Amino acid sequence: MKRMTDKWAFSNRKNEKNRRKNQKRFMKTYCLLGLIVWVAFAYQLMFHYIPDEIYLEEVAIGQNMIAEQETVEWKFAQGMPITVTEQETIQPVFGTQGVTEQRLKHQVISCRLFHLIPVKQVQVHYQERKTVLPAGTNVGIYLKNQGVLVVSCASFTDQNGALISPAAYRLKSGDMIMRVNDAPMTTKEQLIEAVAQSGGRQLTLEVIREQELIQVAVTPEVADDGIQKIGVWVRDDIAGIGTMTYVTSENQYGALGHGVNDIDTGELIQLENGEIYETQITGISKGKRGMPGEVTGTISFQKSEYLGTVKQNSDDGIYGQLEQRPDSLSEVSEIPIGYKQEIEKGTAHIISSVEGARCTYEIEIEQVDFYPKEENKGILYRVTDNALLDMTGGIVQGMSGSPIVQNGKIIGAVTHVLVNDPTRGYGIFIENMLEH
């Protein structure tokens, strides 16, 4: 009996020993997997928050930025310290005296996690720090399409009383009609005339659809009023109100921080030409949760109100040349630009003319994303100025382009409002706008 008891006790001790061994093995595996997941998460987080390229002030080169393989501490806006290794680019120069080496200011910084794991290489551009005039004044914007934009297809009644739509399933919303039977189309009146004079013969339309030039055949039909039609709603221009962001010493300007899209199709306006004018603010529709507000105003397309041209309409703003500066900027001075890595979480200000006069309002920068999915959503902020909140509820349509200033430098511009919270919005880095 005693022998059986000893054998049972020995077996229990052995099982307990194996259980503890398996438990330790499990804990080691669990900890290792946890460490791998944590490192992968940290890697992805750093990759997302480190920009692909940065600009540095040229004056820094002579102080501490040109030592080869120098290890420095780089702290990005999210408070994430990382170690970087700086490397100069050396380029051979062939001349009459033979081959010499030239050290280029354009450099690459290698960023490493825990000083060991490579994360990203950042392109560094050295330049003299630019200064621009922070505008913040409202302007009336007029843009003319390159062609005639199809807003939608429509039906009409023919001479037999039937509803027909010759353009249906041939043209679609967002199409840009450039030519009809080789004749350029720049206005909707030209398109109406070309269709009316067709005599019912098939027309060949050259159309830009999703950035591709295609040909579409449409045969007009006679409507109940006796006029040839194809059944489309079209638009050839657009006008609205926005905010000018900056003006350079050469009177070049940038505005909006986002592109001008057609209100019905959502397509970016393909610009033929455009103009900006002085505008008068007539009212403000206060923003609410789920319902963005709006600044309303009047644009007088008179020669005396004309400010300049619009030469480019891109996803991150409109750009052009001023022929005269708005009166509200006569006493405004230029300030330096702030690079994205200099932006700090905390207090900043926006400059806007929603009250009809150029004013400064306080905001709180909550997040800086160096690698946003959309270029004009790199800065997330919240309006904290009580006067602006009482007046507009936060950010409203028409404020896009309002310059963002922090520590005496212009760092970006207002671009979007969060629909579910009008007190918060996004902004674009000023560097991105100045690339145009």
Image (cartoon, rainbow, N blue to C red):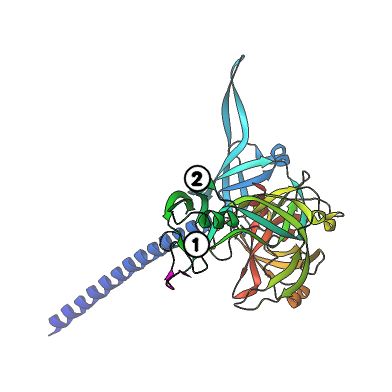
Residue 405 seen in the figure: yes
Which callout, 1 or 2, points to the residue nearer the camera? Answer: 1
Q: Amino acid at mark 2?
A: Asp
Residue 94 position (above or below residue 128): above
**Dividing the image into 4 quarters, which one contains the N terminus?**
bottom left
Q: Amino acid at mark 1?
A: Lys
Residue 127 position (above or below residue 95): below
Asked whether 223 falls inside the magenta stretch, the response is no
Sequence-earlier tag: 1 or 2: 2
Residue 354: give x, y in percent of width and height. 76, 68
Residue 18: give x, y in percent of width and height. 25, 71
What label does residue 229 carry, if any?
Answer: 1
Residue 113 seen in the figure: no
Q: Quadrant of residue 424?
A: bottom right
Q: Nearer the viewer, residue 431 or 193?
A: 193
Residue 232: give x, y in percent of width and height. 50, 63
**Residue found 43% across the figure and 50% down from its top:** 215
What label does residue 182 carry, if any?
Answer: 2
Query: Which residues fall within the magenta stretch?
Result: 157-166
**Residue found 38% across the figure and 62% down from its top:** 32
How packed mark 2 is, by other alpha carbons closer than 10 Å (few <14, some 14-19, many 20 or more), is few
How packed mark 1 is, by other alpha carbons closer than 10 Å (few <14, some 14-19, many 20 or more), is many
